[in-house]
Amino acid sequence: MMWQDLIFMLGSGLSIVFLAPTLRDASSRVPLGTSLPSMGIGFVYAATFFTLGMTFSALGSLAAGTMWSLIAMLRSPTGMSVSGRLLRVESPALFVHDLRRWLTNYRSSTGSEQFVSFDGADAHEQQY
């Protein structure tokens, strides 16, 4: 075992120890904007460590990612539960409307609207 493998495993283990009180406290609320990226990072790190042959680090990161996924399911402020409401889209019509508006704005912009032209005559009016 490489010493780095042990260090990464210990770091993941500490994160699990620090996250355990959040999972046990029924009144705690962790935003999905925090828990979902952390969960994803844990799983990506687990896969990366596994491909590098760092089995203990991979197991530690997998456990940390699993802990974050449990926090996302059980402790999000919106009351997401294990029943599958975590990935539900609240309003598909609103999403489609926003997507159309964004595409229309994207197609109609020429790029010149994002720059402000500087005219020398205006500069002398802005001086105090």
Image (cartoon, rainbow, N blue to C red):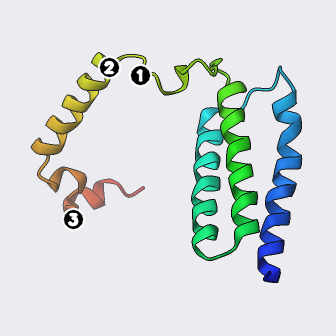
* Amino acid carrying mark 3 in the image: Gly
Please tell me the numbered disc located at residue 55.
none
User: Label 2 is placed on what type of residue?
Assistant: Pro
Q: Position of residue 4 (x, y in %)?
A: 78, 79
Judge left or right: residue 37 versus residue 61.
left
The 10 Å Cα crowd at callout 1, few under 14, some 14 to 19, many 20 or more, is: few
Mark 3 vs mark 1, CA separation in Å? 51 Å
- Mark 3 surroundings: few (<14), some (14-19) or many (≥20) residues within 10 A: few
Indicate the quadrant where residue 26 lies.
Answer: top right
First in sequence: mark 3 or mark 1? Answer: 1
Q: Residue at x 38, y 58 (%)?
A: 127
User: Which one is earlier in the sequence, the residue at label 2 or at label 3?
Assistant: 2
Residue type at tag 1: Val
Element assignment for label 3: helix
Task: Give the left or right position of residue 99, taking residue 63 as reference.
Answer: left
Which quadrant would residue 10 be assigned to in this image?
Answer: bottom right
User: Dot 2: few (<14), some (14–19), or many (≥20) neighbours within 10 Å?
Assistant: few
The residue that disc 1 covers is 89
Quadrant of image for the N terminus:
bottom right
- Give the residue number, with chain letter if any, for mark 3: 120
Instruction: Give the total of numbered labels.
Output: 3
- CA distance for labels 2 and 3: 49 Å
Residue sitting at x 19%, y 61%: 119
Q: Position of residue 68 (x, y in %)?
A: 70, 42
The local secondary structure at tag 1 comes to loop
Please indicate whether residue 101 sits to the left or right of residue 20 in the image. Answer: left
- Check contact, mark 2 vs mark 1: CB within 8 A: yes
Tell me the CA gap for discs 2 and 1.
Answer: 6 Å
